[in-house]
Amino acid sequence: MPSPCIGVFDSGFGGLTVLKALLELIPGADYLYFGDTARLPYGSKSAETVAKYAVEASNFLQRQGAHMLVIACNTATALAFDEIEAATRIPVVGVVEPGAQAAAAASENESVVVIATEATVNSHAYQKALEAHGMDAREMACPLLVPLVEEGWIDHPVTEQVARIYLEKAFTDGFQAADTLLLGCTHYPLLEAVLRRAAPEHVTLVDSAASTARVVAQQMQTHPYFAAGHPTHPARLKFYATDSAEKFKRLGAHFLGQPIEQVEHVDLKE
Ligand code: DGL
């Protein structure tokens, strides 16, 4: 029996933070990672456009043999989860519900601030998911953070200043005492140190990468391959990008925390 193959989809490199968390929890699977770098950012696009791109990417991953699809992109999950699920024959896991669950578990006073892209915030997907868990939620769009991370300004005074401006605004008007900050974007785990310093001291940071990986790991426990106790091999990884393979290797290594050897360029129009 072949080992399970997990397809991970993101608008670009950011979803590699989710792949990193998956590799830690499920090292015995095969992974296909698709980064739609030519059409990034999704965070400023309409729901229709994001749904169209995301369905194309998920079809591609199915054609390559994925048995399960992880939508690592918060924007794609927030705007298009239902469309992707309806168009896909394999199980689909998104990042919004696992992230909301983790934030609800972390918050003691049931008050959570979520930071995300403009499109994610406008969809209110996180607010709805958090309210369903009994949380009070404040969403704050932080559109400048993705370009700063893409520029490599990870631990940079400008990024810290920008983060402070957003977070000062978020933790006001009834949310001064919110005790949890949910990082609702693939890029934000890289800014953990900066966000830690910029957020009020009493706040716990939660990101959806680790919690999404836990949900996938739970589902994998019942997969016949793992349930039958097959000897596992080191994870086999394959990367696809719609823009420059070289750039993907260079920037992607930051997100994945290890070198990326081979990237195949894909043109979905072909
Ligand atoms: N992957 C997106 C997200 O998690 C951030 C980058 C983009 O806007 O495409 O929301």
Image (tube, rainbow, N blue to C red):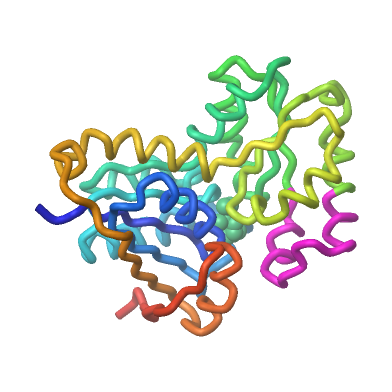
Give residue 80's position: percent from left, percent from top: 44, 46
The number of numbered badges drawn on the structure is 0
Which of the two residues, 41 or 187, is positioned nearer the viewer here?
187
Which of the two residues, 267 or 46, is positioned nearer the viewer here?
267
Q: Is residue 253 left or right of residue 106?
A: left
Q: Is residue 106 left or right of residue 242?
A: right
- Specify whether residue 133 is painted magenta: no
Give residue 254's position: percent from left, percent from top: 60, 67
Give residue 251's position: percent from left, percent from top: 59, 73
Most extreme residue toward the front is: 231
Q: Is residue 111 above or below residue 95?
A: above
Q: Give residue 191's quadrant in the image.
A: bottom right
Split into quadrants, the picture shows ligand 1 in the one at: bottom right
Examine the rendering and report whether any part of residue 42 can be seen. Answer: no
Image point 86% across, 45% down: which residue? 198
Q: Is residue 137 left or right of residue 74?
A: right
Examine the rendering and report whether any part of residue 192 can be seen. Answer: yes
The boundaries of the magenta stretch are 142-163
Give residue 231's position: percent from left, percent from top: 19, 50
Image point 67% across, 56% down: which residue? 190
Image point 38% across, 72% down: which residue? 240
Most extreme residue toward the left is: 1
Q: Is residue 182 above or below residue 61?
A: above
The C terminus - image quarter: bottom left
Q: Is residue 125 left or right of residue 24?
A: right
